[in-house]
């Protein structure tokens, strides 16, 4: 038995117009749902290296030092800036921001005009992380009337070997 080929091939045509419509609908959807979010804080942090922890350059004396002490459970028990007690609790961070604002205004003539200002954070080893982030947020700036005001850009951590005269066993 012989099979004849009639020469009729079925051709499948791709419909381009519906595909282009879908692409444009997806593009419009993503453009309309895109939301621009203001950054929480812009941290310019210099972490100490192991070699730099032993050698302290006298030219890097810092105008401000923030000491944060932890309790047995890691909660914040006391906060001091430049040996001035700020206490503990949520109001302590507001007092910290006001103190930094005063210092920046006195040193440079207004927020955002002191690029050389630097603060050193001396935190207890067991301090909960969210206290450190809240303190960093308080010293870097604030938002007022939907406008961001920069305070201190440079944040430095005290190396573990020299934290308040304590040593940490490793």
Image: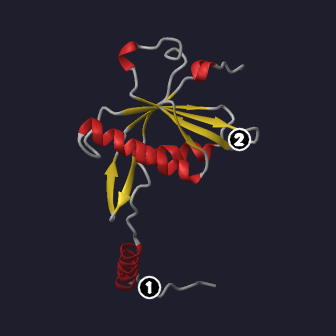
x and y, in percent, of residue 87 in the image = 58, 43
Label 2 element class:
loop
| Mark with earlier residue (2, 1) | 1
Q: Quadrant of the N terminus?
A: bottom right
Front label number (2 vs 1): 2
Would you name the residue on which mark 2 appears? 74
Residue at coordinates 76% horizontally, 38% vertically from top-left? 72
Whether label 2 touches label 1, CB < 8 Å: no
Count of numbered circles in the view = 2
- For the question of whether residue 47 can be seen, the reply is yes
Residue at 62% across, 39% down: 78
Q: Is residue 33 left or right of residue 76?
A: left
Residue 63 vertical position relative to residue 57 in the rendered view, above or below: below
Q: Secondary structure at mark 1?
A: loop
Q: Is the residue 73 above or below the residue 27 in the image?
A: above
The outermost residue toward the front is 84
Residue 17 versus residue 113 in the image, above or below: below
Counting other residues with Cα less than 10 Å from the Cα at mark 2, is it few (<14), some (14-19), or many (20 or more)? some
- Labelled disc at residue 7: 1
Q: Answer yes or no: is residue 160 visible.
A: no
Q: x and y percent of residue 119 in the render?
A: 43, 33
Mark drawn on residue 127: none
Q: Quadrant of the C terminus?
A: top right
- Write down the quadrant of residue 34 in the picture: bottom left
In the displayed structure, does residue 129 sit left or right of residue 138? Answer: right
């Amino acid at each position: 038995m012989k099979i004849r080929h009639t020469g009729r091939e079925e051709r499948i045509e791709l419909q381009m117009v519906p595909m282009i419509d879908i692409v444009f609908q997806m593009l419009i959807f993503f453009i309309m749902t895109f939301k621009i979010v203001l950054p929480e804080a812009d941290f310019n942090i210099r972490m100490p290296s192991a070699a730099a922890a032993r050698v302290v350059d006298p030219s890097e004396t810092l105008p401000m030092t923030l000491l944060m002490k932890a309790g047995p459970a890691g909660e914040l028990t006391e906060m001091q800036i430049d040996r001035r007690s700020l206490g503990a609790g949520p109001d302590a961070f507001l007092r910290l921001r006001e103190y930094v604002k005063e210092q920046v205004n006195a040193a440079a003539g207004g927020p955002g005009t002191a690029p050389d200002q630097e603060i050193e954070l001396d935190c207890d080893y067991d301090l909960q992380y969210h206290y450190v982030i809240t303190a960093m947020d308080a010293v870097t700036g604030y938002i007022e009337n939907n406008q961001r005001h920069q305070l201190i850009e440079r944040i430095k951590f005290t190396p573990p070997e020299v934290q308040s005269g304590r040593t940490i066993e490793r």
